[in-house]
Image (cartoon, helix red, strand yellow):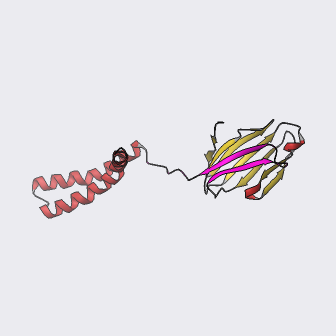
Amino acid sequence: MTEIVKASLENGVQKIRITADKGYHPAHIQLQKGIPAEITFHRVTPSNCYKEILFEEEGILEPIAQDEEKVIRFTPQDLGEHEFSCGMKMQKGTYTVVEKTKKSLSLLQRFWITSIFTVPLVILMIGMSTGGISHQVMRWGTFLATTPIMLVAGVPYIRSAWASF
C-alpha cells in the first residue's frame, strides 16, 4: 500500500504539494475535516491527460499548464476516502478526510497550570496549621484547589489507565 502523506497546518490552512508526472506524487494524502485546504499541483509532464485537475465531489475542475503550479482551495467536510484525478479520469489520487486532531496541553503547560493552583492549596495548609482557617473552609478550599489540578494533570493518566483495562 502507498504511504498516506498528511497535509501540514500553516496559519489555520492545510497545505500540501502534489507533483503531476506519470501519476500524482504523493498519490494519497490526508486532510482534516472542517479546516480549509490548499493543495498545490505542479504539472511536470507534457501529457495532455494532466491538463486539468478534477475534484468531482467538490465540484472543482481546473486547467493547469505544463510547468505551472495550480492551487486548489476547498474545505473538506465529508469523512472518508475521496478521489481526485486528471480531467479524463485516467490518472487518479485519493485524499482521506479525518476528524480534526485535538491539541492537548504539553507536559510543561500542565506543570505551570497545576503550579498556579498549588499555591492556594499551600496557603490553605499553612492557614490550617497556624489555626487561622477553620476546618470547614479548609475542606472546601482543598476541594476547590485540587479539582483543577486533577482535571489538568490527572485526566490523561486516568484515561490511559482506564483504556488499559
In the image: residue 92, left or right of residue 98:
right
Count up the numbered dots.
0
- In the picture as drawn, the residue positioned furthest to the bottom comes out as 136
Task: Residue 56: give x, y in percent of width and height.
Answer: 76, 55
In the image: residue 56, left or right of residue 119:
right
In the image: residue 158, left or right of residue 76:
left
The one of 8 and 27 positioned closer to us in this rendering = 27
If the image is split into quadrants, where does the C terminus sit? top left
Residue found at x 9% / y 57%: 131
Which image quadrant is residue 141 in? bottom left
The one of 159 and 72 positioned closer to us in this rendering = 159
Q: Is residue 21 above or below residue 101?
A: above
Residue found at x 78% / y 47%: 85
The one of 105 and 5 positioned closer to us in this rendering = 5
If the image is split into quadrants, where does the N terminus sit? top right
Task: Residue 132: give x, y in percent of width and height.
Answer: 12, 59
Magenta run includes residue 93 = yes
Task: Residue 145: give x, y in percent of width and height.
Answer: 27, 56
**Part of the protein shown in magenta:** 79-105
**Can residue 126 be spotted in the picture?**
yes
**Can residue 134 be spotted in the picture?**
no
Task: Residue 135: give x, y in percent of width and height.
Answer: 12, 61
Magenta run includes residue 95 = yes
